[in-house]
Each structure stands twice: as structure tokens, then as C-alpha cells.
Image (cartoon, helix red, strand yellow):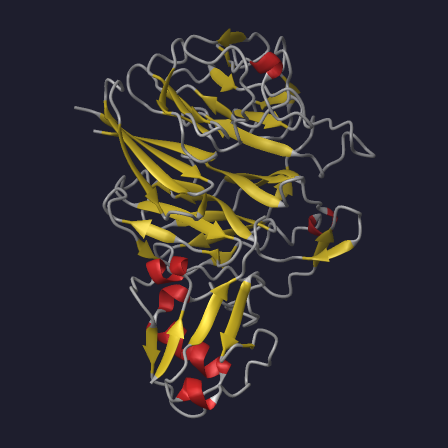
Amino acid sequence: MSQVRVLVGTRKGAFILNSDGKREHWNVSGPHFAGWEMYHLKGSPADPNRLYASPSNGWFGQLIQRSNDGGKTWEPMGNKFEYDGIPGTHQWYDGTPHPWKFARVWHLEPSLTDPDTVYAGVEDAALFRSTDGAKTWEELSGLRKHGSGPSWQPGAGGMCLHTIILDPRDEKRISIAISAAGAFRTDDAGKTWRPINRGLTSEGLPNPNAEVGHCVHHIAAHPSRPDVLFMQKHWDVICSNNAGDSWQEVSGNLPTDFGFAIDVHAHEPETIYVVPIKSDSEHYPLDGQLRVFRSKSGGTEWEPLTQGLPQKDCYVNVLRDAMAVDSLDSCGIYFGTTGGQVYASADAGNNWAPVVRDLPAVLSVEVQTLQ
Amino acid sequence: MIRVLIPAHLRTLAHLNGEVQLEIAGEATMQSLLNALEAKYPMLLGTIRDQVTHERRPFVRFFACEEDYSHQPPETPLPASVVNGAEPFLIVGAMAGG
């Protein structure tokens, strides 16, 4: 019998939600690391019981924890994230040079094939890799040093590397995204990098079509078509059919194309999901109605999904890493809100129900489908 | 034996119920105390001071004998009553957060 394990990172710890394949009844465990901000936790595709987690807080900094039993027990791992060489400066909000300084881990991406290899996207933006199960970390500094780094500026949430996409066909190809620098890709396992932002337009920039400087919020790809990338930018939902070499807007009939989360159906590579948010100054859904929008054609034509979601007086946000899908036959879609709800749909978004309602603000949601 | 009190979150992390007791070889300074603490409990690395620069984390404070040692140089000797165990050395998470 299949099972689903949902890993939820919140402002005050992690929660693990378990259900069988019907996804009707849920067991909730947690808080794990009570009181610590859990930006992200994720399981290894190569060993589902191997989980990596990134608790941090303002007093005691960043920890990395690992579980080898699906989250029942945890052990501390290495938390030394040292930039390669003299880190130099990036631009501060006012355009002045600002020293690169590690703040926290935003995203952990375990290797698709090796349980001991895991990538960490951090603030100030850099990509680290561990090949010993998170005991030690090494910066893939070709990204930060490829040339445009000194011109990068933080987004409102900090200058974070928040998205890491590993290509299942080619382990040397990695795409990442940084707020507010844009998207970048390596084809040689992290030695060299180049911006992949052609086609992005950001009206707030002096040059709206600049090579870097775009506030990318999240990118998703389907494993069967790794060259097709779907991006939720600050404003605009956009798509690339050539691994980021060029992009086209697919916002179409969305009521607002601002948002954070985006994901792809597990079995339909053209079916994508976003949660439109009113604006960058009003981080909540339009008209107090929490609606997921689904496109079955890779964007442009969107339909609202509302059944089971609050349709009045709802003013929560859904953050960039807070949406995920399972891979059961009837694809499950999950998202968490800053109001502490985690909603699940066991039928690809047609019907929704809260799994939990009153967690701390949800920062991330990941799903493991267990056989 | 030097007694050290650490914040609740760090006690949980280090699986401690009460205060820490440390033996320090050589001169007992704040730096040698933190070195000994991190050697005995490596999961605390990076939580009290930066692992590279050894700078105290901004919201962590050090107290001993009702004195604030937070801004003292790391090589500052610990007071005799801390060294002989009469008083604990306090590592405190600052009150912050509104």
C-alpha cells in the first residue's frame, strides 16, 4: 500500500504528516526542532528515509540535521558554510557595495541518485554541496564568481538562493534561482555558470530586460521534460522550452500574475499550478478568496480551483517553497499557508481539504510518495 | 571544574538537562572555555560564535559574577570564582523579538 509523507517547514519547527494512499486520514508528528525556523526539509529520492533539514534562528544561527529513519530521529550534521576565498561584495538595497555574509540555508536539494550528496542554497546567495551526507560543505563558487555577482541585489526577503533543479538526464546540469538576481545554469557540475534570463521583463529595473537582476520567486520542472521550466517571477508566470535559454510569458488569464509558488502535475507535464497573490505590497489572495489556478496547457489558459478552499476573508500567503505534488496515480497537490494551514487535494486540485489548520506560518512543503 | 549554563535551545540540541561541567587545561579564558565546550559538544559549533571568525553571535551574551563579559576580548581570563566552580559562566540568548 502506498503512503505519503508530507514534510512541512514552519516558523517554529518542522511537522511531518503521514497518510496512506487514500490521503483521507493523517497522522501529524511534531514540532521537530521546536522554536527553530525551518526554511526547508527534504527527503532523498535515492533513499526516502534519508531526510535533510535546515533549522535556524536569529540567536543561534544555522543548523543542519539529518534523519536516517524518515524523521523519527535526527542527528546534527555540519553547519560550516564558508565561502570560497575572499567573498567580496554584492550590492546593498541602496546600491552600495555590501560584504557577502552567510545568513541561512533557504533550500536543501538532495541528489537524485546518491543519498550522501545534497545541495544547499543559501543567503547571501551561493550554492554549496556536500558529498558526505552533510558532514562537510563546499561552495560551488563558480556561480558567485562568474562575473555578475558584485551587481546582485537582495530582494525584500534577503539575497537568497532558493531554487535548485537537478536534471535527471544529466547530473552535471543544475539550474538555480536567486532573489533578486535571476536564474542561472551550469552544464559542468557547477564549475561554470551563466545567466538564463533572456525573455524576462521586470519593469522595476533600469533596463527591464537586463541579463541579471530579476526577482525570480520559484521555478519548477517535470522530470520527464527537464528542458521545460516554469517560473513564477515576482510578477509574471513564464515558461522556457529550452532549459532557460529563452522564456515566454504564460500568465494568460490569471487574475494577477504575482505569486510565489509554482509546481507541475506528477503525470501531466503540461499541467501546472500557481497561487495568485494580489500584489507585492499586499501578500494575500485577491478578494480574500484562496484560489489555486491550474493550467493544463503549460500556461496561458488557467482555471480557478476553489472547492474546499476558503472563498471569503482569507488573507494568507503561500510562499515559494510551500507547494508540492505526490506521484500517486491520482496526483496529490499540497500547499501550506502563512496562516498555518496545509491543504491537500487527492484529485489533482479539483477538491481540497485542510490536513492541519493551526501550525505556525508554513515556509515549505515537500512530499514523499512511499511504496 | 567550571560550570556553564547555556540557553534552553542549546541544551536541547546537546541533549543536556542542566548545566555543563568542563575541565579546561591551561589558563581559563572565555576562549578556552568556548573551545572546551565545543569540543565536548560539537553540535554547538556555530551556535554561540561564528565557526570561521569566532565572533560572538549578536544575540548571544556572556555573563559571570553579575558582570557582562560579552564585549570583553576572547582571551579575557575568567574570574576566580568561575574557575573554582563557585559561580557559573552564563551563556544567554538575548531577549529580542519584540
Indicate left or right for A321 with A20 as reference: right
List the single residue furthest toward the left: A1
* Quarter that holds the N terminus of chain A: top left
Residue B18 occupies quadrant? bottom left
User: Is B81 located above or below residue A119 in the figure?
Assistant: below
List the single residue furthest toward the right: A206
List the single residue furthest toward the bottom: B26
Q: Residue at x 76, y 34 (%)?
A: A210
Residue A5 at x, y percent in the picture: 29, 31
Front in this rendered view, residue A221 or A22: A22
Indicate left or right for B63 with A86 as reference: left
* Quarter that holds the C terminus of chain A: top left
Does the rendering let one see residue B79?
yes
Indicate left or right for A335 with A67 as reference: right
Q: How many marks?
A: 0
Residue B96 at x, y percent in the picture: 56, 54
Indicate left or right for A275 with A79 as reference: right
Residue A364 occupies quadrant? top left
Q: Residue at x 65, y 54 (%)?
A: A145
Residue A356 occupies quadrant? top left
Residue A25 at x, y percent in the picture: 24, 21
Q: Residue at x 65, y 28 (%)?
A: A234
Does the rendering let one see residue A189?
no
Front in this rendered view, residue B62 or A162: B62
User: Is A28 located above or below residue A267 in the figure?
Assistant: below
Residue A212 at x, y percent in the picture: 71, 39
